[in-house]
Amino acid sequence: MRGRQVFMESLRLHGVTKIFGNPGTTESPMLDSLMDYPDIEYIVHLHEGVAVGAGNFFAQASGQTAVVNMHVAPGLGNAIGAVYGALKNNTPMIVTAGAQDTRMRLRDPLLGYDLAAMAEPVTKWSVQVESADEMGPVLARAFKIANQHPAGPVFVGLPINVMEQETDIAATTAGSLEERPYIAEVHLAKVADLLRRSRKPVFIAGDDVVREGARDALVKLSEKTGAGVHMELVSGRFSFPADHPHFRGRMGPDAAAVHQAVGDCDLVVLIGGPFFEEVWHTDVAPFESNTTVVQLEVSPARLAHNFKVDVGLAGDIRNALERLNEMLVDETDFEERRAALADLKDHENQVSSDRFEALKDRSPMTPSQALFEVGRAIPADALIADESITASGDMVRYFRLGSGREYYGGRGGGIGQGVAGSIGVAVAHPDRQVIATTGDGSAMYSIQALWTAAHHGLKILFIMLSNREYRVLKHNMDQYRRRFAVESNKPYPHMDLANPVLGFTEMAAGMGVPARQVTDPADIAAAIAAGVAAEGPYLIDLVVEGLETR
């Protein structure tokens, strides 16, 4: 058999049903082979970064290992930023790229380069298959490494001549690997005792709470112990229901903000995340010196990675939380803690409501007003692919994330992930309505995704929050000037998206997606109804205020 056949059989053995890619000449063996594998669908994209972004969210939404295919050095270069996003999202992914014929390696062929070296900094393992005999073993190892916790992308280079070489070594897998160890009872009993004796406990939950199916167990444990639950600043999944009385919101951008949120807690329990990804340096420690810190992770790699913990446990998160629930019983002081959290949530909701009422008649509408109307109008079971960034607080407030609606977001801080990622969510769930929320600046990094959505008839409602600026950069410019004592009343440099204003309805129409611009919040519900009723994708351009119009 030929190398390309071993490649395709390897995908089939590992349960792959989709390839996200942008085709090129060196990919001819794979593309030609697809006709013999009708169970593997190729999702075609107009840019490599969009293909990787779609594969990133597809893996999160489907539970499958994503496979994405790039084209030689420039194509892989186009995708590197998105591969970084998949790495930070802990996405199991095989990134492949066709490579030039190895017999021309010393002649510096057109488009030739060391692809494995290019991909190595943003992958868990990077390798080029040097002979057809290596194809099966390399791919078996690649899938194993990509899925080992913490999961992440692996790069495999596929020279065109290797794909056509003959081999007797068939496709294989690494076998059935069990990597979620059972945590000993004595160790969990110690955590249960700490929760029982704590004056004010708090949980900080990462994405693995959702990936491991542990969200319901965490909700029950929070309710049982009267402990609030925070999430990380940036998350790929929503690990606790946003409308629950015990939800305490996302963490801030630095250690001082973490300390402000949990500094009065005597017990902090970290569950399933890289704790913490900071934006700014501060000299403040996240926890008081006398705070007891417990960390529960899927594997040892993350335990005590950034700071000392008092108890660090690696194993099956869901099983551990369920057993903790069995060890604990309701007590009076737990009820008092629950009541205090409910009162605090009511107060915060009232403050938010008062602010909303004070600003609701602004023109252009506020992002808060826009997302309030969107949240009321979209289907209750819609899947959310999000990159709202500066409006993310309003999305948390109005979209019932983590309870009625599943959430998929990008990590790593690179923008453009939301629009691209919505393709992957829709491919994973073709019978569900996907809502892609994004800002106008972020959307332009992956706007080619609109064509893919139309080409494949995907059920995506794109919600553009058009404030005609890079608003997050303006916020960060304010932070920079404050933190480094830069005295300035200068304007924001090169952060406005005007002259000309971006025309999203025109861009969408040019790529086969019907679209409508909305400037009045009273028209949002009707626009969404039209978008949901559409057979395929639909775009709504919501004109909202920016910092300069406030």
Image (spheres, grey):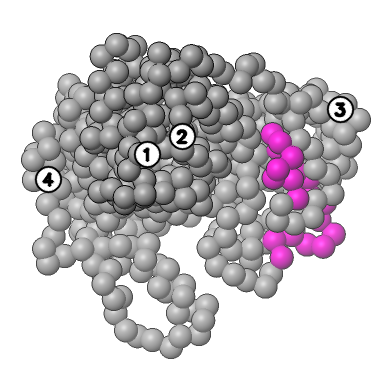
Relative placement, left or right, of 245 versus 376 is right
Q: Earlier in the sequence, mark 4 or mark 3?
A: 3
Q: Give the image quarter of residue 69.
A: top left
How dense is the environment of label 2, judged by Cα within 10 Å: few (below 14), some, or many (20 and up)?
some
**Element class at badge 3:** loop
Disc count in the image?
Answer: 4
Task: Say which mark, if any, is on residue 130.
Answer: 2
Of callouts 3 and 2, the N-terminal one: 2
Amino acid type shown at disc 3: Ala
The quarter in which the N terminus is drawn is: top left
State which tag comes first along the sequence, 4 or 1.
1
Q: Which residue is mark 1?
A: 102
Viewer can see residue 69: no
Which one is in front in this view, the residue at disc 4 or the one at disc 1? 1
Residue 352 located within the stretch drawn in magenta: no
Residue at 11% of width from left, 33% of height from top?
512
Name which of mark 1 and mark 3 comes first in the sequence. Answer: 1
